Amino acid sequence: AAGVIQSPRHLIKEKRETATLKCYPIPRHDTVYWYQQGPGQDPQFLISFYEKMQSDKGSIPDRFSAQQFSDYHSELNMSSLELGDSALYFCASSGQTYEQYFGPGTRLTVT
Amino acid sequence: DQQVKQNSPSLSVQEGRISILNCDYTNSMFDYFLWYKKYPAEGPTFLISISSIKDKNEDGRFTVFLNKSAKHLSLHIVPSQPGDSAVYFCAASAASGTYKYIFGTGTRLKVLA
């Protein structure tokens, strides 16, 4: 069965650079969620989109923005990167049920 | 303020025995709960879910129990297998247009052969 796809899987950036993470949800899933997991921490909700509209917002810094496109894929844009942004970034998708399915994550390292 | 808590950071169980992972929550508005299994450097894998209209849900070796009055849920794995060794997260959400899940801190399960 098709799963959530995230790209890239690994990304290394320097401080103050920008990064774009992409997420392709499971086919026919209309909702996308972004989570950030720091080392030794639980995943923290960042933002979600339903039918291309932002539906909920969590602890997402103002330096980050995201959007969902007409094909339901989503991109998380991160600017002015800081060392503390180094983390695993997960995307999850859901359809008509409340169950969310996660992608493999993007490991972002900021040096 | 941690709304979803997994008070046991780690648990070791012999192969073939039962593993019981616990999760407590504080927000009485939570009514959807998920359990995930996570290996290092991989995304969380969905295991089993339960909504607040039920007190038990079973899927193969995995059973989740929900005690709403105690704001407590538990995941039972029977029989435990070495491949079950991973970090287990519970997550909770209140019903809304979309489901923003709050994750617990995780419990590392080690199943000993």
Image (cartoon, coloured by chain):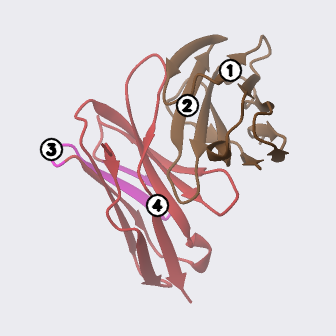
Identify the residue position indicated by label 1 in the image: A66
Q: Name the mark nearer the viewer: 1 or 4.
A: 1
Work out whether residue B16 or residue B25 is closer to the camera in this orientation and state it. Answer: B25
**SS of the residue at dot 4?**
strand
**Residue that carries the numbered disc 4 in the rendered image:** B62
Amino acid type, label 4: Phe
Residues at marks 1 and 4, common chain?
no
4 vs 2, front mark: 2
Question: What element does badge 2 sit on?
Answer: strand
The amino acid at mark 1 is Ala
Q: Are marks 4 and 2 on the same chain?
A: no
Please tell me which residue is depicted at 47% across the width and 27% down the height of the picture: B99
Q: Residue at x 62, y 45 (%)?
A: A84
**x%, y% of residue A108?**
74, 46
The C terminus of chain B, quarter of image:
bottom right
Q: Give the residues in magenta.
A: B56-70
State the residue at coordinates (70%, 59%): B41
Which chain comes out brown in the rendered image? A
Q: CB of mark 4 within 8 Å of CB of mark 2?
A: no
- Is B34 situated left or right of A109 in this image? left
Q: Can residue B60 be seen from the camera position used here?
A: no
Q: Residue beneath label 2, please?
A: A46
Are the residues tagged 2 and 1 within 8 Å (C-beta)? Answer: yes
